[in-house]
Amino acid sequence: MPVSSVSSAPETVSISLGERSYPIRIGSGLLCSPDSFADVPQASLAVIVSNTTVAPLYAQALRETLLGQHRQVELITLPDGESHKDWITLNLIFDDLLARGADRKTVLYALGGGVVGDMTGFAAASYMRGVPFVQVPTTLLAQVDSSVGGKTGINHPRGKNMIGAFYQPVCVVADLDTLSSLPARELRAGLAEVIKYGPIADADFLDWIDTHLDELLARDAAALRYAVRRCCEIKASVVGQDEREAGLRAILNFGHTFGHAIEAGLGYGNWLHGEAVGCGMAIAADVSARLGLLAENAAARLTGLIERAGLPVRGPALGAERYLQLMRLDKKAEAGEIKFVLLDAIGHAVLRGVPDDVLRRVLASRCG
Ligand code: NAD
Ligand code: GLY
């Protein structure tokens, strides 16, 4: 689709999950529009959960919008960073909610990137056994992926996102204007998750990204809007068919088995999540080609695109044994056998075990 044909009115993608269905609103100026939050249940108290970077930029605007809807709107400001996505920071949310007298009707608003979104969602899932929450994603990565689909949680030193819950928000409000303040490195990290949707589900979308990558990197508004919408459509369709990852939803983890090992192996926050996923997708494409599932030129094309997006395609030198040890903890592993999301064509993913000798060869050639 040519970017010029995209309208500027807010758009809504729906995620169909029976009584847990909700809208994903995508557009400009949404943070300041009460209509964006029309689905939120009545509650006298609302609590915005954000962090030290995002709160000074956007919390006041959101608070003013929400004061039309809630009598009292409070703010919890967490420390920023993946290294704080842990139970100590999670507990700060519970401490604050209890101190403010939050009850079962209190609505939480996650204002920030995927770290704030995942932690706020998990807090909402467990505070008083569940309170409503709204995702207000402010990074590209969060707008195209983490705010949608209800995976919430925290990291454990031994493994990424190991503690958590499936818990859906009441709506997602993705204000594209917030992407203007995003550091360039974070934008590129978000592009990793944008690219992901092409190889796993939509070859035409991968062609589109290939053609429009420079516009995306330059934050062209129409290009970003189209990319966010298409990614949310694909994710909504996958999650609508397999909310709790009994099978199909695993394709959304393309590149993540290697990526999570990189994040945990280096220490959370050294590589950004999107950087690790970008590199993980290049490694997974290589594995797919070595197993004869994917044509070598298709794997090379995907790797080239990841590189052009400014993302790493070679992993850090953790050593093959350490990679294997970390990957055996992956949530897709069954009885110690690691399952990988691989490609048997651009636009189609499969879940497979991979012999250790193949993994060792790939890791030796692509890492370090
Ligand atoms: P992040 O939340 O750490 O945000 C990246 C950085 O950008 C942070 O420093 C943040 O404060 C800052 N920031 C956020 N919005 C900004 C803005 N508009 N302007 C300026 N700075 C801004 O990282 P992320 O990439 O958004 O998310 C990564 C996390 O998401 C990881 O923990 C990952 O595991 C998780 N994730 C979850 C899912 C899911 O389905 N739940 C999917 C993908 C990723
Ligand atoms: N980001 C992976 C998932 O939502 O399943």
Image (cartoon, helix red, strand yellow):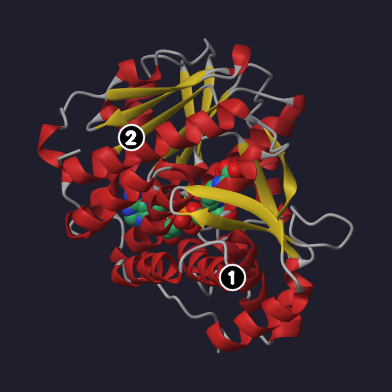
Q: How crowded is mark 1: few (under 14 residues within 10 Å), some or many (20 or more)?
A: many
Secondary element under disc 1, as helix, strand or loop, is helix
Question: Of residues 90 and 310, which is closer to you in this image?
Answer: 310
Residue at mark 1? 287
Please, which residue is most extreme toward the left here? Answer: 4
- Kindly identify the amino acid type of the residue bearing the numbered disc 1: Val
Question: Of residues 281 and 172, which is closer to you in this image?
Answer: 281
Residue at mark 2? 229
Please, which residue is most extreme toward the right here? Answer: 335
- Give the foreground label among 2 and 1: 1
Residue 310, compared with residue 11, is above or below; it is below
Question: Of residues 344 and 330, which is closer to you in this image?
Answer: 344
- Kindly identify the amino acid type of the residue bearing the numbered disc 2: Arg
In the image, what residue occupies the spot 37% across and 61% down?
Answer: 186
In the image, what residue occupies the spot 74% across and 81% down?
Answer: 357
Check the picture and name the quadrant holding the C terminus. Answer: bottom right
Q: In which quarter of the image is ligand 2?
A: top right
Res 268 visible: yes
Residue 52, compared with residue 119, is above or below; it is below
Drawn side of residue 33 relative to residue 202, left or right: left
- Residue 136 picture location, percent across and down: 43, 35
Residue 361, compared with residue 286, is above or below; it is below
Check the picture and name the quadrant holding the N terminus. Answer: top left
- Residue 79 picture location, percent across and down: 54, 57
Secondary element under disc 2, as helix, strand or loop, is helix
Drawn side of residue 207 relative to residue 261, left or right: left
In the image, what residue occupies the spot 20% across and 55% down?
Answer: 211
Dividing the picture into quadrants, the one containing residue 98 is top right
